[in-house]
């Protein structure tokens, strides 16, 4: 699975304004609504589902990266958003560090395989230090998308 298979290109944000975990999730879910990937009346339910997942354990996996995710019946396919915070956000990360890179996933409950493959792809790509550094330095959504495309095409040495 590649980023192009699930990241909504219109739900990429280079300058995340949020400064806490809940606001990050709300801002990223809002990008999915603005990109017409989810219905407005489902937004709050999706935010709550992601926050409930966070209660099980932070999806801040360390090294400045978080992958908030949930399964939700309002979507019929896996969708994702990407955001960069240049200041960093306290996301209760496993290593205690501020998070700068966020990959948010929402998938239908009946498609667990897609959900797992997307998480696997994200974790594999984010092990590449060069890729992470390029993403953290991205100033525009276009920069982020180019980095995702380069990663999909194995064009980032790391």
Image: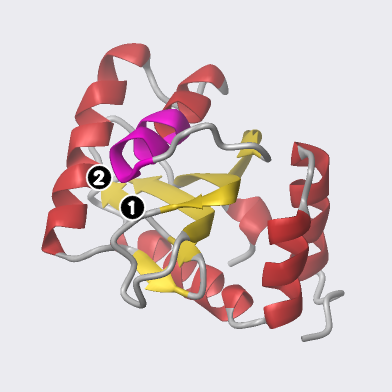
Magenta residues, as a range? 20-28
Q: Is residue 127 above or below residue 132?
A: below
In the picture, the quarter occupied by the N terminus is: bottom right
Q: Is residue 19 above or below residue 103?
A: above
Q: Quadrant of residue 43?
A: top left
**Front residue of this view, candidates 144 and 91:** 91
How crowded pointer 2 is (Cα within 10 Å; few <14, some 14-19, many 20+) is rated as: many
How crowded pointer 1 is (Cα within 10 Å; few <14, some 14-19, many 20+) is rated as: many
50 left or right of 15 in image: left
Residue 148 in view, yes or no: no
Q: Are marks 1 and 2 in contact (CB under 8 Å)?
A: yes
- The tally of labels here is 2
SS class, disc 1: strand
Residue bearing mark 1: 69
Residue bearing mark 2: 50
Q: Is residue 23 magenta?
A: yes
**Residue at figure coordinates x 25%, y 45% from the top left:** 50
Residue 139 spot, x, y in % from top left: 79, 44
In the picture, the quarter occupied by the C terminus is: bottom right
23 left or right of 152 in image: left
């Amino acid at each position: 699975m590649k980023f192009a298979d699930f990241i909504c290109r219109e739900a990429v944000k280079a300058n995340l304004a949020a400064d806490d975990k809940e606001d990050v999730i709300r801002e990223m879910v809002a990008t999915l609504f603005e990109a017409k990937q989810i219905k407005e009346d489902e937004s709050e339910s999706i935010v709550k589902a992601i926050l409930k997942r966070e209660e099980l354990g932070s999806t801040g996996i360390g090294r400045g990266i978080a992958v908030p995710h949930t399964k939700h019946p309002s979507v019929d396919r896996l969708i994702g958003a990407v955001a960069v915070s240049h200041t960093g956000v306290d996301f209760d990360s496993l290593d205690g560090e501020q998070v700068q890179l966020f990959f948010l996933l929402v998938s239908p409950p009946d498609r667990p395989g897609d959900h797992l493959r997307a998480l696997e792809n994200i974790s594999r790509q984010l092990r590449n230090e060069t890729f992470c550094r390029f993403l953290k330095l991205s100033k525009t959504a276009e920069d982020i998308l180019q980095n995702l495309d380069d990663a999909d095409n194995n064009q980032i040495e790391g």
